[in-house]
Amino acid sequence: MLKTKEKVLETATLMFNQEGTSSVSTNHIASRLGISTGNLYYHFKNKEEIIRSIFEKMVQEWDIVWQVPSSDWQPNLVDLKAIIRQTFQLQLKYQFFYRELIVLMKIDPLLKDRHQKIQAQRMTEQKRFFQHFINGDVLRLPHDEAIIDTLLTISWMINNYWLAFLETNNEDISADKIEQGIQLIMTVLEPYINRDGGIT
Amino acid sequence: MLKTKEKVLETATLMFNQEGTSSVSTNHIASRLGISTGNLYYHFKNKEEIIRSIFEKMVQEWDIVWQVPSSDWQPNLVDLKAIIRQTFQLQLKYQFFYRELIVLMKIDPLLKDRHQKIQAQRMTEQKRFFQHFINGDVLRLPHDEAIIDTLLTISWMINNYWLAFLETNNEDISADKIEQGIQLIMTVLEPYINRDGGIT
DNA sequence: TCCAAAATAGAGTAAATACTCTAATAAAAA
DNA sequence: TTTTTATTAGAGTATTTACTCTATTTTGGA
């Protein structure tokens, strides 16, 4: 059975996803859980600390998804798609973050700092990841160096905003829609995929 | 000189952009403007009506940007870039909307309905717009029909989320960054651009 | 000039929010 | 067992928020 602290994070995440952070008060969270506000504040200094803790959980799960399988791993599109798929699933779990990030960072400078650090790290990691695919001859890029950054940025954006985009279109998110998101990224990379390397 | 009603919308927009809608109360807006709350509520039924009015203004400006210049207009990349540039500028002016849309729609079902209608309309318009470019031989697409929708979706997403993406990266938005956003979209279209048609 | 309608001021309020404080209970350690 | 520490309950509070109400002023037309 989960400890109170973990239960708060879990329930808060669900409620934030459903109603948005500003509509969900600490009192709401406590009463939904059937605990007292005193208890909730025993575990968390304030609402922002709850949000920051959720962020840290998300970061941990994200890191697991994106770690390179092993040192002798051969980059291929099937694995890439699997990773993108898992990233989409994480976004689903922590939807509110992707929706409200900018405002949340405005309200909480600590979260802002933390996010900025993480984001910078990830950018570097992803670039290295991408390089694997070029070195592994799965992707073949023009001499123009800048194109790597550009493609990476676009892929990142699709990966980050596809679900939000669906939401603004009032489409509900199904496994099928996630595959469509993967497809979008593949379309961007398509012109640069080397048909000889990796399995499509 | 602007009427009170217009001034409220203008000031509210600025404040929402700076601090986020949930941090800006109707009292804040009134006092920033140096008017009474009574006065503000004389012009607007509630806070949501303010937000909806701002949305309508944004829609109007957007429509001006995207109307096809004239019936005998020849599609070309220079004009396309100009339109994208103006769209980015609109996003800058109404930043808070792009950041908070999903939550705002959750809070206000009227806004949600309205946005959904507008969004659907625009999708159709943009598709027609895109078709101009194909018919005008500026773009050449593979027989695969689905690719049109895919490219359109990706372009739309970049156009809608590029500035938000920059914000999460803590980069401030300059004219230069806007050009970079245009470049992103062009990179996506690049493999399908017919070098003979239109001027790059 | 007069008057009805439009615009404004500003005091007032119910509800909600984030959080504190103290006392009680449960769990762990000695 | 006893004692210390970790949890929990729940009443209480200062502040804020969205919004109302009434009285006053301004404005534009007849």
Image: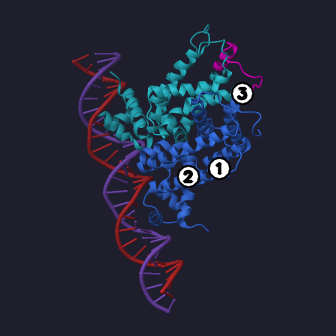
Chain colours: A cyan, B blue, C purple, D red
A48 left or right of A189 in image: left
Q: Label 2 amino acid?
A: Val
* Neighbour tally class for label 2: few under 14, some 14-19, many 20 plus, Cα within 10 Å: some
**x and y, in percent, of residue A95 in the image:** 47, 33
Mark number for residue B68? Answer: 1
Task: Classify mark 3: helix, strand or loop.
Answer: helix
Residue drawn at x 77%, y 35% is: B196
Q: Label 1 amino acid?
A: Val
Q: Do we see residue A9 in this rendering?
A: yes
Q: Nearer the viewer, residue A27 or B151?
A: B151
The correct choice, above or below, for B57 with respect to A51 in the image is: below
* Neighbour tally class for label 3: few under 14, some 14-19, many 20 plus, Cα within 10 Å: some
The residue indicated by pointer 3 is: A147
Q: Nearer the viewer, mark 2 or mark 1?
A: 1
A29 left or right of B143 in image: left
Task: Classify mark 1: helix, strand or loop.
Answer: loop
Range shown magenta = A128-147
Q: Residue A7 appears in which quarter of the rendering?
A: top left
Q: Do we see residue B174 in this rendering?
A: no
* Image quadrant in which the N terminus of chain B is located: bottom right
